Image (cartoon, rainbow, N blue to C red):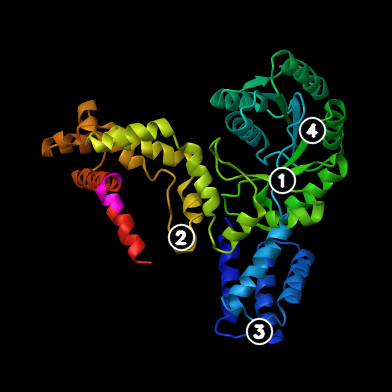
Amino acid sequence: MFNNLSDKLDKAFHVLKGHGKITEVNVAETLKEVRRALLDADVNYKIAKDFTKRVKEKALGQDVLTTLNPGQLMVKIVKDELTELMGGETVGLNLSGTPTVILMSGLQGSGKTTFSGKLANYLKNKKTKQVLLVGCDVYRPAAINQLQVVGEQIGVEVYAEVGNQNPVEISQNAIKHAKATGKNVVIIDTAGRLAVDEEMMTEISNIHKAVQPHETLFVVDSMTGQDAVNTAKAFNDILNFEGVILTKLDGDTRGGAALSIKSVVNKPIKFIGTGEKMEAIDVFHPDRMADRILGMGDVVSLVERAQEQYDEAEARKIQKKIAKNQFGFDDFLKQIQQIKKMGNMKDLIGMIPGAGKAMKDVDIDDDAFKGIEAIIYSMTPKERSQPATINSSRKKRIAKGSGTSVQEVNQLMKQFNQMSKMMKMMQGGGGRKMMQMMKGMR
């Protein structure tokens, strides 16, 4: 996410390294590189020009603060301006209706149907809402079937009228069904086209007038760059939508859409899609995204994701097992499953300050735990609960069953034992000693 832009901005700030003050000469050279970085990221030329102009006005002539050098000061100014460029503040959904009606719009291939499912899953799990998904794409082959598969996957009802070619009628009937069945959120997945056309705009406009949605969201594929911004403007002129959804931000995207779209349509980005899984949805925080673009990570979001997966009752069970030396591979497997639910590994590493830059050229497979899981699944229940029983002959059998080598099984056993010892030490007196040592080092 934004790796190319991050690298180029980092190089731009190096121009100021070693200077005691920001001057017109060194700031001009830096901002030239900043503007070039934005243009390479597919940011509109006028937006990039206005951006660097505002940064220049804020930076010129400023004395370096005692705690900042010119490079750090410029990074702070650029961060603040990036935050403003992307909307300034986080804007949530309007969920005031009974039921709340959310209308999804966008071009075909933007990820609208998948994101409708992600949003339904998000509202169901995080806002404890009763959600109804509505299939109004009556043109695309298997579109309604796709939505039904998604609905079954996340445990959300899908309303569809097979054979009815009137999306306005379907959406109105769906809202009646939602009221009758106690659903408090209705998400209407509409049809898309390969390009903006009059027929498409008329249809979505008619649905909008008929259902009077509380939220109209425009779903855009961030990988389409500046085209995404132009499409958003065309839709906004007809629908006057409330917010933007950026999908596929985990792909090979230059980021221009995220940086430009707020300036063009003056509507906030509300959510982003960061992967294929139903959990791969994040609320869009302009300030946190600015931090990530500038290589500062996003610790707050990382902690929030960890807290979402934290099970207090399960944690207490684990603590008791560790204290009694009963922590086994089944418990280890549960910890892995929780980490996997937090998102793809590269995205998580990118949230750690400095780690994203250090790991930018490292290919981190989303199935990084696949080998470990295969080894554990090849163990018997007794071996998982009592790792000490695993001898050399058992290791050979486990390696054969998991398609790995004995060396890999040995490595996992060694890592597991080290982790178990560390966890026990942190629970007992060793944890207190370690904390005391850390305090003494301050």
Amino acid type, mark 3: Asn
Residue at 47% in and 37% down? 309
Mark 1, Cα crowd under 10 Å, few <14 / some 14-19 / many 20+, is: some
User: Which is in the foreground here, disc 2 or disc 1?
Assistant: 1
Residue underneath mark 3? 26
- For the record, the magenta segment spans 427-432
Residue underneath mark 2? 355
Quadrant position of the C terminus in the picture: bottom left
Residue underneath mark 4? 214
Q: Is residue 81 above or below residue 373?
A: below
Marks 1 and 4 in Cβ contact (< 8 Å): no
Q: Which of 174 and 143 is in front in this view?
A: 174
Q: Earlier in the sequence, mark 4 or mark 2?
A: 4
Amino acid type, mark 4: His
* x and y percentages locating residue 99 in the rendered image: 75, 24
* x and y percentages locating residue 381 in the rendered image: 24, 26
Location of residue 189 (image quadrant): top right
Residue 429 included in the magenta stretch of the image: yes
Marks 1 and 3 in Cβ contact (< 8 Å): no
Residues at marks 4 and 3, CA–CA distance in whole angstroms: 49 Å
